[in-house]
Image (tube, rainbow, N blue to C red):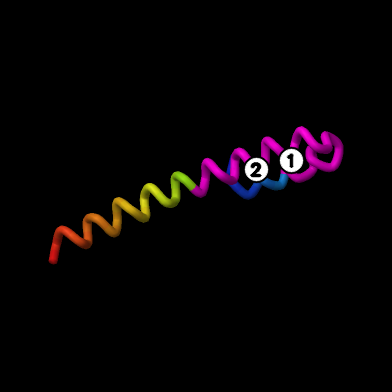
Amino acid sequence: MKLYDMINLLSHLQQKGGESMDHIIRFLVSIMANVAGYYIRKWLDRNDKDS
């Protein structure tokens, strides 16, 4: 299952699930942001060590 498919599925569930699905989507988005930030920091630290 691709990430786009998962987000699309969650958005359809939000329409039916209401407030509780909003919390789940916000939680998943925060996890994805933390993972992206982790890899960006690793990439920047690796470039910092080269100079």
Q: Position of residue 21 (x, y in %)?
A: 75, 36
Q: Residues within 10 Å of mark 2 (few under 14, many from 20)?
A: few
- Prevailing secondary structure of the magenta residues: helix
Is 28 one of the magenta-colored residues?
yes
In the picture as drawn, the residue positioned furthest to the right comes out as 16
Q: Which residue is mark 1?
A: 22
Query: Height in image: 12 above or below 47?
Result: above
Residue 1 position within the rendered picture, expressed as x and y whole percent measured from the top left: 59, 39
Describe the element under mark 2 as helix, strand or loop. helix
**Quarter of the image that includes the C terminus:** bottom left
Residue in view at x 79 percent, y 43 percent? 12
User: Separation of disc 1 and disc 2 at Cα?
Assistant: 6 Å
Residue range in magenta is: 9-33
- Report the front residue among 14 and 23: 23
Q: Residue at x 29, y 56 (%)?
A: 43
Q: Identify which amino acid the numbered label 2 is placed on.
A: Arg
Q: Are marks 1 and 2 in contact (CB under 8 Å)?
A: yes
Label 1 SS: helix
Using the image, tell me which numbered label, if any, was put on residue 26: 2
Q: Residue furthest bottom?
A: 51
- Name the residue located 52 percent from the left edge and 45 percent from the top edge: 32
Q: Is residue 39 located in the magenta-colored stretch of the structure?
A: no
Label 1: few (<14), some (14–19) or many (≥20) C-alpha neighbours in 10 Å: some
